Amino acid sequence: MRRMSRQRRRPAVAGALWVLSCATLAACGGGGGGGPGPVPAPASIAYALPPTTWETGDVLLPLAPQVTGGAPDTFAVVPALPAGLTLEPSSGMLSGTPTTPTPHTVYTVTASNAGGSAQTTLDLTVVLARAENLAAKDPATFTDDDIRYFLGRTHFSTKTAEFDAVKAVGIPAYVDAMVDASDDTNAALESAAAGMLVNATDPVGLEGGFPSQAQVARYWMHLMLNNPQPFQDALAFFWHDHFASSTVPVESNATWFMTQQINLWRKQGSGNLRSLLLAMARDSMMLVWLDGILNTKNAPNENFAREWFELFSLGVDNGYTQTDIVQASKAFTGYRLRFDATTGQAFTQFDTNRHDTGPKTVLGVTIPGQNVTDDYQAVVDITIDNRPVAEFISKKLFEYFCYAGPTSVPTDAMAALLRGNGYELKPLLKALFKSEAFFSPKSKEGRVKGPVEHLVGFCRATGLTPIDNKAVTDPAAWPQNLLRTVDTFLTTCAQRPSQPPSVNGWPVSEEWLSAQNMLDRVNGVRECIRDRTDQLAANGGADPARALLSANPTSLEAVDQLALLLNVKLTDAERTQLANYLDTSYNATTGVVTPSPFSANNATHVSERVRGLLYILVQHPTYAVR
């Protein structure tokens, strides 16, 4: 049953800068006459605000002028201050929040009374907040921390080899290559992963065509863990959350639909948005998941049509009506589920006899009646060409990779870029991952990792993936590591790839922060750390944990190296405490802790202390965020 879309948390929007300097001018004349005597003119006026740079959105707290001489009655400024800033005419108080970028301008503030006036100038520039700015960040300002942050958002983790690769060419060049390669085919990787779908009972020629739900999930886990281009799967997982469908209600003769869908996201996730939306609408897994195979001219089913507008292209109540849903559901008629008479394998097929042949009016545009093919292309084109699909998808991408609740400023810029490039996603992704907004302090505040990012990220960063060896009776095509342990813990943590909980996808950020879920995550990492025997055997007898450290680090250097690897932010006190941990030995029998200087070349120290330190670090609050 369809569920209502969840509400995303919207953190407070960070602010914005302006450059301000003051120059006090001589008081203007003013004479008096008669009465009790002349009124003294203001001698000078100034504002105690040093020259600085601010961004749109920052608050200027009320700031009173410093005036000498006679007290002013009125204050005025020319030209008008930037939008959002005000000058109180009776007190001269400056305040407000600049809302619009404004080029450098000299503003003259005049303080007046009956005796005369004094003036000061304000040199003021308002620039767009970094958190909202899609312009490219200056390449000369990128830091090592920027690289680690970038990899954590796009690669599941900060793997040492990937950090070195980014460092060698710089973030802008690496982003271009990363996005360009995001639809590449890696034959060896995909062949090994496909082996996880094979069963001994598969018909000849349909090997891998009848996988279990577990096999489908582990197929994608293998790709995530081993892909040398991890952004391909990180982006595909974004689309999996967006087009959330699950193998749970699907029979074993149709689970192969999900592997097709996974590869659709992996191959077209950075391609053309129009083509991707059409392919997803006709996708066999989606047709089954949202009852497209039950949608006929005699019994229209609104499930997919409703989610098409509400979740996939526009958002809840964003420019469509119930009538549009009804009309679109008629356009989406015609597909059915079929079965191969010989093998029993399921497939979907368009049947003209089930298709509504009449005209349909969707979003004010009429689709002519016909019975040659489906009307999916027409609905996709009408929606994209007449409604803010580009804005909706841009916001979803921005919130997933940057931060929740952005203003329309960065997402409108993204949408314009998307439309301007014929809905090709690669230019948009390149701009996003080089932008001031992506690297802004607001974006770096972090979002809580989902279990996939948490566990897959740890395995990729450290190489300590639990190894579940196949038995001699298992199909020869299966890889050596069957990933049962990884699958078990992702399932326990409620984020098994291929099985989102509903059409709304998975929880977001802080929604993952239950005590049980955090405990389950740590237990999963514990299995990664405890699997010493199999990991050493797979690594020729060497402990892969040793490769995470430099040649001969001190205990404090070892702490720093592993903290950087996992992008954990430690205080000085924590660093010292963890270094002391490495420099001690614990007797499990007696419970006695004794001093024992750490050596990275001591196999026992690596097996016990380095792995133990990794276990401690993944429980640090900063490891929970990306």
Image (tube, rainbow, N blue to C red):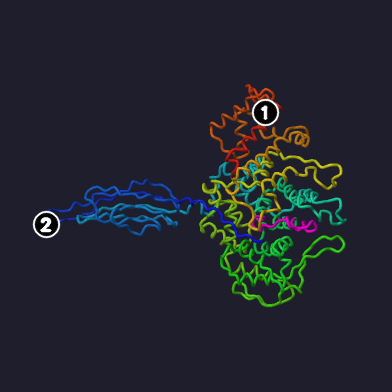
Q: CA distance from mark 1 to mark 2?
A: 93 Å
**Looking at the image, is mark 1 or mark 2 earlier in the sequence?**
2
Question: Around disc 1, counting alpha carbons within 10 Å, would you say few (fewer than 14), some (14 to 19), or many (20 or more)?
Answer: many
Classify mark 1: helix, strand or loop.
loop
Residue 522, given in percent of the width and then of the height, sits at 65, 39
Residue 179, given in percent of the width and then of the height, sits at 65, 53
| 255, above or below 449, in the image | below
**Residue at mark 2:** 34
| 398, above or below 451, in the image | below
Q: Amino acid at mark 2?
A: Gly
Q: Main secondary structure of the magenta part?
A: loop
State the residue in front, 499 or 138.
499
Quadrant in the picture for the N terminus: bottom right
Quadrant in the picture for the C terminus: top right
Label for residue 600? Answer: 1
CB contact under 8 Å: marks 1 and 2: no
Q: Which residues are magenta?
A: 239-258
Q: Amino acid at mark 1?
A: Ala
